[in-house]
Image (tube, grey):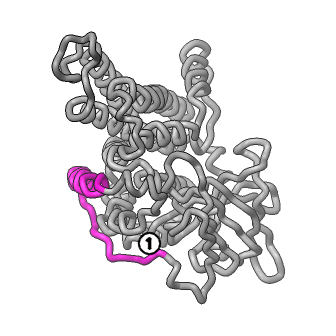
């Protein structure tokens, strides 16, 4: 499928809709991790070629859904495994060490499930969770281009004589092309933020695969067009209420982002080690026979591994804190502590993803830059994905909290 293909979703074009395959029902954290490792081993093969050709991973994402991983955060009361946040982060880290573009596709699926847990009523939860456990995927249509900032939006949900209608234009819509449900963030007539679940196949929904970013090439994070499409009232969630109550949906979303970057970093370090061992030549002045015996290369590989281990340790620590906080009543202070803990992890995962993917070439040498190896994909992926949230603002939030006791602003992505 071309990266410039335009797909108009109409009732007569059901062949373009994502299939719903029977999904396995995962029952435990251990099973989720075992399946993630097995899929990562499979997805690693062909990841470079998919990136090079900008070939969307349709078969792979369907295997992901059929494996049951898409339902691991569904509460046990609704039939899901309700795995720990530590397991959720590890699943993303493992998958993204194999193919971070493929691993990013379900990122919003889990972010939206967090919104459902906090903002949906009992009937909405039952319906959405049942679909997810059956193997259906949730996409994303939140951000917009051309607005003052990420908080401003132009999409509108209006009440008409013919019922609710939704119009707008979205971008950075990772997961929408592969999704069965496309949740759309919009403003209602009172100016309140709502989340509208739009079923694929709804007349007026158009998804354009026009993502041209130099990294995360196969995420299809392009445009969603909403042309006066009909909306059932039961598919509207009052997202504005989320800002009125303390929660950890934002930190959970950021935890997944950090896990993706940790996966990118691990892949870059692993490829650096492999290339140095198997292909690189030692520097003439080193006096050694193999590049892997160069004392400066050895030193730098050790440094990369330490930084990677530190980032992973903070990621696991932050996830563990989220598990503790989720088990009790969440107040404003707990929400702030969660945001800060995840921000610390995100600082280190951002830094190691960028550093490792650049250091790879210094250690591996000129041959590593050849297009046939496509090792630049690690840096392209790291640079693209880490732009989601400026790490300078994470550092500011951490410092302001520790120095002045000021809690970070509460956003759905914090």
- Foreground of the two, 111 or 47: 47
- Residue at image coords 50%, 56%: 219
- Mark yes or no: residue 403 visible: yes
Residue at the bottom extreme, as displayed: 12
26 in the magenta segment: yes
Q: Position of residue 249 (x, y in %)?
A: 52, 45
- Left or right of 144? Residue 305 is left
Q: Position of residue 311 (x, y in %)?
A: 37, 28
- Foreground of the two, 41 or 227: 41
- Foreground of the two, 245 or 232: 232
Residue at the left extreme, as displayed: 289
Q: Position of residue 342 (x, y in %)?
A: 46, 32
The relative height of residue 407 versus residue 209 in the rendered view (above or below) is above
372 in the magenta segment: no
Q: Position of residue 291 (x, y in %)?
A: 23, 23
Examine the image and state in which quarter residue 299 appears. top left
Secondary structure found at label 1: helix
The relative height of residue 354 versus residue 20 in the rendered view (above or below) is above
Examine the image and state in which quarter residue 295 appears. top left
Provide the residue designation for mark 1: 131
The relative height of residue 97 versus residue 63 in the rendered view (above or below) is above
**Quadrant where the image shows the C terminus:** top right
- Mark yes or no: residue 314 visible: no
- Residue at image coords 39%, 64%: 61
- Residue at image coords 48%, 72%: 127
Number of numbered discs overlaid on the protein picture: 1
Magenta region, residue range: 18-45
Disc 1 crowd, CA 10 A, few/some/many (<14, 14-19, 20+): some
């Amino acid at each position: 499928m071309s990266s410039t293909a335009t797909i108009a979703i109409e009732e007569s074009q059901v062949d373009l809709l994502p299939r719903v395959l029977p999904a396995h029902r995962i029952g435990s954290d251990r099973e989720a991790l075992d399946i993630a490792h097995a899929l990562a081993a499979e997805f690693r093969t062909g990841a470079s070629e998919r990136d090079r050709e900008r070939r969307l991973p349709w078969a792979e994402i369907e295997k992901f859904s059929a494996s049951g991983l898409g339902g691991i955060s569904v509460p046990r009361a609704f039939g899901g495994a309700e795995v720990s946040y530590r397991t959720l982060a590890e699943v993303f880290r493992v998958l993204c060490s194999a193919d971070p573009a493929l691993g990013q596709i379900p990122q919003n699926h889990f972010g939206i499930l967090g919104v459902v847990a906090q903002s949906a009523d009992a009937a909405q939860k039952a319906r959405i969770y049942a679909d997810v456990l059956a193997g259906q995927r949730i996409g994303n249509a939140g951000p917009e281009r051309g607005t003052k900032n990420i908080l401003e939006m132009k999409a509108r949900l209006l009440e008409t004589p013919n019922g609710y209608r939704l119009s707008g234009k979205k971008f950075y819509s990772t997961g929408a092309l592969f999704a069965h449900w496309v949740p759309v963030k919009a403003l209602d007539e009172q100016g309140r933020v709502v989340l509208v679940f739009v079923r694929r196949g709804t007349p007026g929904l158009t998804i354009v695969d026009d993502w041209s970013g130099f990294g995360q090439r196969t995420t299809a994070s392009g445009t969603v067009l909403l042309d006066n499409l009909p909306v059932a009232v039961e598919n509207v969630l009052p997202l504005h209420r989320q800002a009125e109550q303390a929660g950890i949906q934002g930190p959970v979303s950021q935890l997944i982002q950090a896990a993706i970057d940790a996966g990118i970093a691990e892949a870059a370090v692993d490829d650096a080690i492999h290339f140095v061992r198997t292909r690189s030549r030692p520097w003439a002045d080193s006096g050694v026979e193999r590049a892997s015996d160069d004392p400066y290369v050895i030193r730098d590989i050790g440094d990369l591994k330490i930084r990677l281990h530190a980032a992973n340790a903070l990621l696991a620590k932050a996830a563990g804190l989220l598990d503790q906080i989720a088990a009790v009543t969440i107040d404003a202070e707990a929400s702030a502590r969660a945001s800060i803990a995840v921000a610390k992890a995100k600082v280190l995962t951002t830094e190691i993803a960028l550093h490792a993917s650049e250091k790879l070439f210094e250690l591996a040498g000129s041959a590593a830059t050849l297009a046939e190896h496509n090792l630049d994909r690690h840096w392209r992926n790291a640079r693209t994905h880490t732009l989601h949230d400026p790490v300078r603002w994470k550092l500011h939030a951490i410092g302001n909290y520790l120095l002045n006791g000021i809690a970070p602003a509460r956003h759905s992505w914090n």
